[in-house]
Image: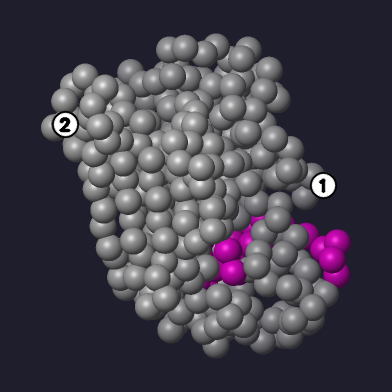
Amino acid sequence: MNGPIEQRAEVRPPGPYRLPRPSADGLLRRRGDVLFRFLRVEGHGVLLRAAQLRDGRVVLGARTADGPAGPTAARDALGHALQRWRFSLGVDVDLSAFVRAHADDPLIGPSVRRRPWLAPQRRPSAFEALLCAVCEQLIAYEDAVRIERRIIARHGATRHPDVASHPRLRDAPDAVRVATQLVPAQLEACGLSPKRAAALHRAAREIAAGRIDASAGCDPERLLLRLGRLPEIGTWTLALVSSQGLGRDDRPPSGDLNLRKALGRILTGDPRARVPEADVDAWLARYAPWGALAAAHIMATRGDLLPGRAAAEARPARGTRTGPDAPDAIPAAA
């Protein structure tokens, strides 16, 4: 094994921006002002770093060893990893139009003005987004995170720090590993229900075999269509894959229980209120094509800031009501 090869990039985000926080699943970690991530790309383990300067610029770095295939292959892997790092951090996304359009909105305006950089979490690959979405179906978020962490710890790759100030990092298992080296029972042992373990394994097989294209340059509509034909993959799961794995803001997770609770709390002042999924769709239609961004601001809004005011001043769009989507739509009594 030869010495490390590095690539760096400096980006000035085109709109309001802040680096994301460390992720609950442990994949995205912070030490001081530096954000860390580890990715396995084309057989190479790539250490990724990011820091935001005081003037708003973001400095990105990627490092790997050249390995037996030589420095050319290592540089190709670095370039791909850096591209996915930029995507997952959202440094090239301009939120200015959304902020201008909705800074004075009675429902989400206070959050937009306070946090103009807020956006849904992104993942470096569509399969990672799918894995986490399947884990989060129909259970409490804290339980889902425990499942995700078990899957990552038992079946992902680990990078031990070579610098004392760096954290130990892990990468989630990719579709090829899940399809060829795991069986559904191993996913069940991490806490997934049998149906969801089978669904994730089936999706991984389809992607690994090339029957579903989930690569960085895939056709997003075709990917979502093909995934949606698989059992246990419903509209909520597809919405998370769309926003987190494909970077689209036009498909909000309307069935998300936390979203339904947050909207109910804002509209009524009752912390126990939950808005039906069809009504969530109606409310979010007013923010098209940024429904996922609006949903993020709704979930970040404290209900006591707008008790009853949003319900009086904002009106849901008409003609956009849709029913819950089986199998993974969250029921009202969940």
- For badge 2, the amino acid type reads Pro
Q: Residue at the location (51% across, 42% down)?
A: 164
Residue 194 appears in view: no
For this view, does 91 lie left or right of residue 67? right
Q: Nearer the viewer, residue 238 or 246?
A: 246
Task: Estimate the x, y position of residue 22 in percent, counting from the top left.
Answer: 57, 52
Mark sitting earlier along the chain (2/1): 2
Q: What element carries label 2?
A: helix
CB of mark 2 within 8 Å of CB of mark 1? no
43 is within the stretch colored magenta:
no
**What is the CA distance from the residue labelled 2 to the residue labelled 1?**
56 Å
Disc marking residue 333: 1
Task: Estimate the x, y position of residue 97 in percent, counting from the top left.
Answer: 38, 78
Q: Nearer the viewer, residue 153 or 53?
A: 53
Quadrant of residue 190 within the rendered picture: top right
Residue wearing tag 2: 71
288 is within the stretch colored magenta:
yes
Q: Residue at the location (78% across, 69% down)?
A: 265
Of circles 2 and 1, the one toward us is: 2
- For badge 1, the amino acid type reads Ala
For this view, does 290 lie left or right of residue 134? left
Q: Is mark 1 on a helix, strand or loop?
A: loop
Dividing the image into 4 quarters, which one contains the N terminus? top left
The segment highlighted magenta reads 270-297
Residue 309 appears in view: yes
Q: Nearer the viewer, residue 209 or 51?
A: 51
